[in-house]
Image (cartoon, coloured by chain):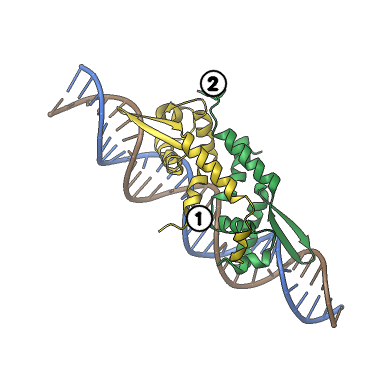
Chain colours: A yellow, B green, C brown, D blue
Amino acid sequence: MDTVYQKQTKVYRAFCDEKRLRILHMLRGGEKCACKLSENLDIGQSALSYHMKILVESGVVDSRQEGKWTHCKISEQGSLYALKLLKEITTPDKSASALI
Amino acid sequence: MDTVYQKQTKVYRAFCDEKRLRILHMLRGGEKCACKLSENLDIGQSALSYHMKILVESGVVDSRQEGKWTHCKISEQGSLYALKLLKEITTPDKSASALI
DNA sequence: TCATCAAATCAAATATTGTCAATATGATCT
DNA sequence: AGATCATATTGACAATATTTGATTTGATGA
C-alpha cells in the first residue's frame, strides 16, 4: 500500500523528466495523437508509451482512444490538483511541527 | 549546458521522492535544524545531506549556517516560482503547437 | 480471414538515483 | 593544539528508472 507521500510523488514525476516536459510542452498546443508526439521527440515508440503511462498516472494528462489512435491532452482537472497540492506542500502549517 | 527542460526538472525533483516530501512536510512547521530532520527519517546522515542538496538546488528550500548547525526552511520565493512555473507548464498555449 | 497499422507490453541492457560506511571539513570548546 | 560535534563529500554498491528491440494486442479495412 502506498503512503500518502508515495502517492504524491506520482503527481510530480510528470515534471521531473526532460522528455516528459517536452511532451507536456507539445500538449500545451492542444490535444495530439501519440504518433505525432513520438515523431517530434527522439525516442522510440515504446519509450513514448512508457512516458505516457507515467503522465497519465500523474493525472496531468488524459488519453482517449479513437480507433487505433491514442489522443492525449493536458487534463485541466489534474493540473489544478497538482497546483493545489503543490501549494499545500509548500505552505507553512504549524500542525506539521507536531511530527518533530 | 542544461536545456530549459533540464533546468525545470531540477525544480520538481524536490517533489518526486518520498523522503524529500517527508522533509518538506516537517519544514511546513517552520525552520528546523538538519540534525532534527535526520532523527525523524529512517535515513543516515549522509543520505539526508544528499536530499537537502537536491531540495536547496530546487530553490524550494533555503539553508542557513549557524555555527556548526544547518537550519533549513521552505523558501517562499522558491515555492512561488515552482507554482508559477507549474501553472505555465500546464496551461494551454497555442504557440506551442508550432513545434508540431 | 488476412494484412496492416498504432500502441502496449515484456525482457534485457543501460543509465541514473539513492544509500551506506568511511573520511574530510569546518566550527566550537577546553 | 587537541577533542568533539554537525555536516559535506567520496566511492562502492543497491535500487530504480529509462531505453531498446521484439512481440503482442486490438482496431481497421481489403
C-alpha gap between disc 1 and disc 2: 37 Å
Is residue A6 shown above or below A60? Answer: below
Mark 2, secondary structure of its residue:
helix
Is residue D29 shown above or below C15? Answer: above
Kindly identify which numbered label has been placed on residue B74: none
> Viewed as shown, does residue A14 lie left or right of B11?
left
> Viewed as shown, does residue D24 lie left or right of A33?
left
Is residue B35 shown above or below A87? Answer: below
Rendering coords of residue B33 (x, y %): 70, 64
Question: In the rendered picture of this protein, how many numbered marks are placed on residues?
Answer: 2
Residue drawn at (77%, 60%), measured in percent from left and top? B65
Rendering coords of residue B69 (x, y %): 74, 65
Mark 1, secondary structure of its residue:
helix
Q: Amino acid at mark 2?
A: Ala
Kindly identify which numbered label has been placed on residue A5: 1
- Foreground: A38 or B70? B70
Q: Quadrant of residue A51?
A: top left
Q: Chain of mark 2?
A: B
- Residue wearing tag 2: B98
Within 10 angstroms of label 2, few (less than 14), some, or many (20 or more) residues?
A: few
Q: Is residue A16 visible?
A: no
Q: Amino acid at mark 1?
A: Tyr
Q: Quadrant of the N terminus of chain B?
A: top right
Residue drawn at (43%, 43%), measured in percent from left and top? A57
Q: Chain of mark 1?
A: A
Rendering coords of residue A44 (x, y %): 43, 35
Q: Is residue A53 visible?
A: yes
